[in-house]
Image: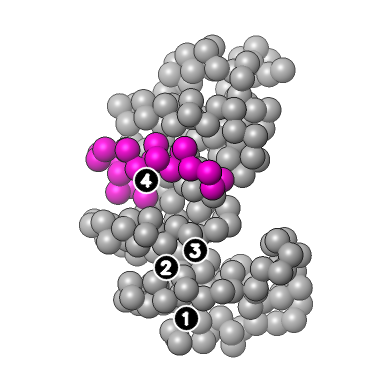
């Protein structure tokens, strides 16, 4: 058993177990650790070997696997060569199965690694039957919008096109969030995208996509 898992179990409480279980699907195994404690413990254990991170992903409990992806995220912040982190994330995506696991690690672990590399894997994920994998496809490019240049954005918009009509809120919300941040980097590109696609964007996606636009433009695209 990894020392991170030992520490997570040591910080479990019945109250936090109840709170965590209430926001997860029925029957999802939990330890019962508050999120701040989990993040602090993951940071403290961020130098753990990747073999131990992979072992954590084998654990059934939510906090063990969220802790694993938090460690991946902390490792990605500390390295200039995140290839091994990217490989582990994709190889074990079946164990990364909640929206917050994706949001915690996909931008730096997947998006950063792929920013100046081919994006074929993201397009494969965007066409997955699994909505959590589709979320990775559109959440990873947030890194390009936050830390890249307008030249990094064309495939973000193409991925959003693939997911335009996705009815799963696990996907439609991050589509809108990715578009919003792309618009902060290149507003004309966002407006061009919206001129073509606003009518078919899911309501949740459109609401987030226009959130940072000036009021007259928000009014133009909202429906």
Residue at image location 55% in from the left, 27% down from the top: 164
Q: Earlier in the sequence, mark 1 or mark 4?
A: 1
Q: Earlier in the sequence, mark 2 or mark 3?
A: 2
Q: Give the Cα separation between the discs numbered 1 and 4.
A: 26 Å
- Residue 97 seen in the figure: yes
Residue at image location 76% in from the left, 73% down from the top: 18
Name the residue that disc number 2 marks: 71
Q: Earlier in the sequence, mark 2 or mark 1?
A: 1
Q: Give the Cα separation between the discs numbered 2 and 1.
A: 10 Å
Name the residue that disc number 3 marks: 95
Evaluate if marks 2 and 4 touch, with contact meaning CB atoms under 8 Å apart.
no
Residue 96, percent from left and from top = 50, 60
Crowding at mark 2 (Cα within 10 Å: few <14, some 14-19, many 20+): many
Seen in the image, is 132 located left or right of residue 107?
A: right
Crowding at mark 4 (Cα within 10 Å: few <14, some 14-19, many 20+): many
Seen in the image, is 20 located left or right of residue 111?
A: right
Crowding at mark 3 (Cα within 10 Å: few <14, some 14-19, many 20+): many
| Picture layout, residue 209 above or below residue 15 | above
* Residue 128 falls within the magenta-colored stretch: yes
Crowding at mark 1 (Cα within 10 Å: few <14, some 14-19, many 20+): many
Q: Quadrant of the N terminus?
A: bottom left
Evaluate if marks 2 and 1 touch, with contact meaning CB atoms under 8 Å apart.
yes
Q: Give the Cα separation between the discs numbered 2 and 4.
A: 16 Å
């Amino acid at each position: 058993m990894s020392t991170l898992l030992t520490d997570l179990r040591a910080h479990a409480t019945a109250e936090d177990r109840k709170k965590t279980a209430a926001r997860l699907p029925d029957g999802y195994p939990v330890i019962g650790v508050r999120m701040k404690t989990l993040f602090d413990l993951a940071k403290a254990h961020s130098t753990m070997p990747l073999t131990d991170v992979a072992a954590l992903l084998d654990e059934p409990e939510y906090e063990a696997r969220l802790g694993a992806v938090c460690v991946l995220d902390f490792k990605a912040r500390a390295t200039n060569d995140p290839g091994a982190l990217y490989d582990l994330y994709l190889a074990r995506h079946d164990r990364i199965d909640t929206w917050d696991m994706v949001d915690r690690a996909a931008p730096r672990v997947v998006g950063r690694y792929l920013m100046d590399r081919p994006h074929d894997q993201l397009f494969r994920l965007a066409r997955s039957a699994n909505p959590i994998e589709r979320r990775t496809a559109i959440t990873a490019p947030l890194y390009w919008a936050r830390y890249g240049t307008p030249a990094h954005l064309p495939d973000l918009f193409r991925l959003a096109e693939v997911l335009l009509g996705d009815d799963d809120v696990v996907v439609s919300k991050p589509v809108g969030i990715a578009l919003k941040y792309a618009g902060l980097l290149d507003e004309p590109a966002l407006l061009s995208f919206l001129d073509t696609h606003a009518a078919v964007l899911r309501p949740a996606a459109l609401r987030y996509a226009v959130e940072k636009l000036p009021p007259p433009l928000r009014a133009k695209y909202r429906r």
